Image (tube, coloured by chain):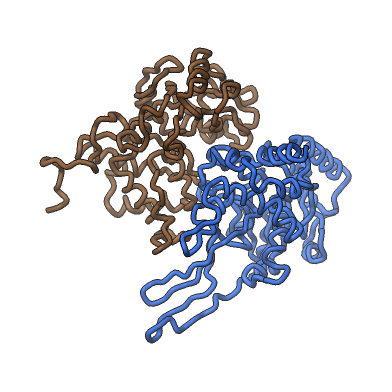
């Protein structure tokens, strides 16, 4: 679906008056039910931009590459938190950003649609989204039954930072408990928990799509890419997969905004967000901080308070 | 032409398993992939293509080349890892993947450098292809003068014929294998059904310009701004190279443990920042634009020049598995269009 004309005109104006050099949005892609990122630099290209529940990618992951440039970007509710995450960590100046926000009912997971219809995902070749339904041949699946599991637990449908809002706000409660899977894991014994973690990461291919799709993974050189010395063995042994996922998870403690881009990008279907959600819950509980909500709030790793939790020291 | 009723597939697999290892599409860890068959019932040939490529059968993602251990004060005991010469049947490979083996042979099994690890597996493995009766939207094998019923790379070719498969020996060793098995001769009805299915399969392919000649187009585009443009949305995750049946770049590292160690070969990817990173810290491919240029140049310019074959078979896996849906067919079309502009 193309953007409303008022939004298109606003983007064209930003491009024309030099407020932005490039606008990062979505356009229809080569595979049904999955839009693809697009980088618009001229007013003529603005018509390519779309918004619908196939716009899955968190485009904020591209932002750190455009440091020093003036950028326009489209964000869903969850994506907008990543912008706040970058602002809080002083990674991108707000004045160089123009943000179009869209309220998102949840994005379509083709695997879930295929499961609902009992067909392989590659058979969804004529699928489309219309009127709150995913249409495949003469069958339809309601949107709320087609989206990613993490979207069903979403409590942030609306962008919390935007210059322009492109559609109406959505006020619906999460269908699933956002912390349900975390509480399930917490109920396990240490050994069971470790086994559960091992089982989940045993599918990891070590392709690092999760890191690259993550808007907060912006280290210039990631620890797995260090070669002098080499810290990380890129083999298929379980301990190497565990090492990578543990290190990445902990490096995102107090920083992960919970957008779920990592989990959606994983070609192996590893539920990466499960580990990150646990840390987000811990940070919230111990430091009363939630990343990606308030750009003025000081991240726990950047501050010291007398009453900080220090139970682990003694 | 022989025929195997689908109801007898398990018995056929069981017969193969009697004195060979059989590798075929099986359901493992919630995905369908090529793996060693433990029970003939596990084999699933009702699939369009696997997410991962069967190239790992010959060229595993990670393999130990040698082991070494410390006996006195240094790593003074070195052991070669035995070559894998288990007689194997690789069953149910799609023709695009079977063609990729012929391509990989040019890298690992021909010319000046022969890879004993690859060769051992390759020489002891019989390839049974399964013609592709239902190409995907993202398939473009036909751009390579090939097609869903290509027999290249197969020792035996199986074809969908309704309630049976037609079975045809392509090579001598394929014929020898079939000689020992009791398959019926195909009847006219099944031959006609197979032909119908084949015509339907071919008609499903999306129109696409032939690849041939792209190497001369690419030769003009080394310094083109095109690379920055096409790579702009790339996340650099390398998934495309991991699922590619033709990508074959690897890295060799010595892993040192307390008392022993191993020399390990693992798949590398031109999409990674560590690809061709020199010990000095310099990298001749410093950004994603340069890496995408390498990906395209390697597949469509250097390889045709060096080994007389493209490093792509048109399976479309890279398009389907890309987290941002970067479509190599569009990049190919851009290259072809750009080259026309340069010439004009």
- Report the residue that reaches farthest toward the right: B188
The correct choice, above or below, for B90 with respect to B116 in the image is above
Task: Determine whether, in the image, residue B48 is placed left or right of residue B265.
Answer: right
Looking at the picture, tell me which residue is in the foreground, B63 or B30.
B63
Q: How many marks?
A: 0
- Residue B7 can be seen, yes or no: no
Residue B194 visible in the snapshot = yes
The vertical placement of B275 against A308, above or below, is: below
Q: Quadrant of residue A34?
A: top right
**Residue A207: x, y in percent?**
49, 50
**Quadrant of the rendered image containing residue B306:** bottom right
In the image, the chain rendered in brown is A
Provide residue A286's location: percent of width, then percent of height.
Answer: 19, 40
Colour assignment, chain B: blue
Q: Position of residue B319 (x, y in %)?
A: 61, 41
Is residue A230 or residue B165 the one in the foreground? A230
- Look at the picture and state if B86 lies above or below A275: below
Q: Position of residue B32 (x, y in %)?
A: 58, 48
Q: Quadrant of the C terminus of chain B?
A: top right
Identify which residue is drawn at 30% across, 54% down. Answer: A191
Residue at the (34%, 39%) spot, across then down:
A256
Residue at 82% from the left image edge and 59% from the top image edge: B170
Q: Residue furthest top?
A: A6
């Amino acid at each position: 679906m193309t953007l409303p004309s008022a939004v298109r005109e606003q983007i064209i104006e930003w491009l024309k008056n030099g407020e932005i050099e490039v606008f990062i949005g979505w356009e229809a892609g080569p595979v049904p039910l999955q839009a693809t990122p697009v980088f618009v630099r001229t007013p003529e290209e603005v018509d390519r931009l779309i918004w619908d529940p196939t716009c899955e990618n968190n485009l904020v992951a591209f932002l750190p590459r455009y440091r020093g440039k003036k950028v326009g970007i489209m964000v869903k509710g969850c994506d907008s938190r990543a912008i706040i995450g970058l602002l809080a960590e002083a990674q991108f100046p707000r004045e160089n950003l123009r943000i179009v926000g869209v309220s998102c009912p949840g994005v379509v997971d083709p695997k879930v649609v295929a499961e609902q219809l009992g067909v392989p995902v590659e058979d969804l070749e004529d699928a489309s989204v219309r009127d709150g339904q995913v249409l495949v041949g003469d069958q339809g699946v309601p949107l709320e039954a087609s989206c990613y599991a993490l979207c069903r637990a979403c409590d942030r449908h609306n962008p919390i930072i935007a210059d322009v809002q492109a559609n109406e706000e959505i006020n619906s409660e999460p269908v699933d408990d956002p912390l349900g899977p975390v509480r399930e894991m917490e109920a396990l014994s240490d050994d069971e928990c470790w086994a559960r973690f091992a089982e989940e990461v045993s599918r990891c291919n070590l392709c690092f799509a999760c890191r690259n799709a993550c808007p907060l993974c912006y280290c210039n050189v990631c620890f797995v890419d260090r070669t002098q010395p080499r810290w990380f063995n890129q083999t298929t042994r379980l301990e190497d997969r565990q090492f990578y996922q543990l290190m990445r998870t902990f490096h995102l403690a107090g920083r992960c905004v919970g957008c779920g881009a990592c989990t959606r990008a994983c070609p192996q279907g590893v539920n990466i967000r499960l580990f990150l959600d646990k840390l987000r819950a811990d940070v919230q509980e111990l430091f009363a901080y939630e990343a990606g909500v308030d750009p003025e709030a000081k991240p726990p790793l950047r501050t010291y308070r007398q009453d900080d939790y220090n139970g682990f020291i003694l | 032409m022989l025929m195997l009723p689908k109801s007898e597939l398990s018995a056929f697999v069981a017969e193969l398993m009697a004195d060979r290892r059989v590798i075929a599409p099986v359901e493992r860890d919630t995905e369908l992939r090529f793996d060693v068959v433990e029970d003939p019932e596990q084999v699933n040939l009702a699939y369009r293509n696997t997410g991962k490529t069967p190239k790992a059968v010959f060229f595993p993602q990670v393999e130990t080349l040698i082991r070494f251990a410390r006996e006195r004060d240094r790593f003074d005991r070195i052991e070669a890892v035995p070559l894998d010469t288990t007689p194997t049947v690789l069953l149910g490979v799609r023709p695009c993947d079977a063609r990729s083996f012929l391509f990989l042979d040019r890298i690992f099994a021909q010319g000046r450098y022969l890879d004993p690890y690859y060769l051992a597996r390759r020489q002891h493995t019989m390839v049974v292809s399964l013609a592709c009766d239902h190409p995907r939207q993202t398939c473009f094998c036909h751009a390579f003068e090939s097609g869903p019923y290509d027999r290249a790379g197969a020792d035996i070719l199986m074809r969908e014929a309704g309630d049976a498969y037609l079975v045809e020996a392509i090579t001598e060793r394929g014929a020898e294998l079939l000689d020992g098995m009791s398959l019926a001769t195909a009847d006219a009805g099944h031959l006609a059904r197979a032909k119908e299915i084949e015509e339907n399969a071919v008609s499903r392919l999306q129109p696409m310009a032939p690849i041939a000649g792209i190497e001369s187009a690419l030769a003009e585009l080394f310094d083109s701004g095109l690379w920055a443009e096409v790579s702009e949305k790339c996340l650099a995750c390398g998934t495309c190279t991991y699922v590619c049946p033709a990508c074959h770049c690897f890295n060799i590292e010595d892993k040192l443990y307390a008392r022993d160690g191993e020399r390990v070969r693992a798949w590398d990817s031109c999409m990674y920042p560590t690809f061709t990173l020199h010990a000095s810290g310099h990298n001749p491919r410093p950004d994603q634009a340069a890496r995408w240029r390498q990906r395209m140049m390697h597949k469509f310019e250097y390889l045709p020049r060096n080994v007389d074959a493209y490093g792509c078979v048109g399976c479309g896996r890279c398009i389907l598995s890309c987290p941002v849906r970067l479509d190599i067919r569009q990049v190919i079309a851009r290259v072809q269009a750009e080259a026309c502009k340069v010439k004009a």
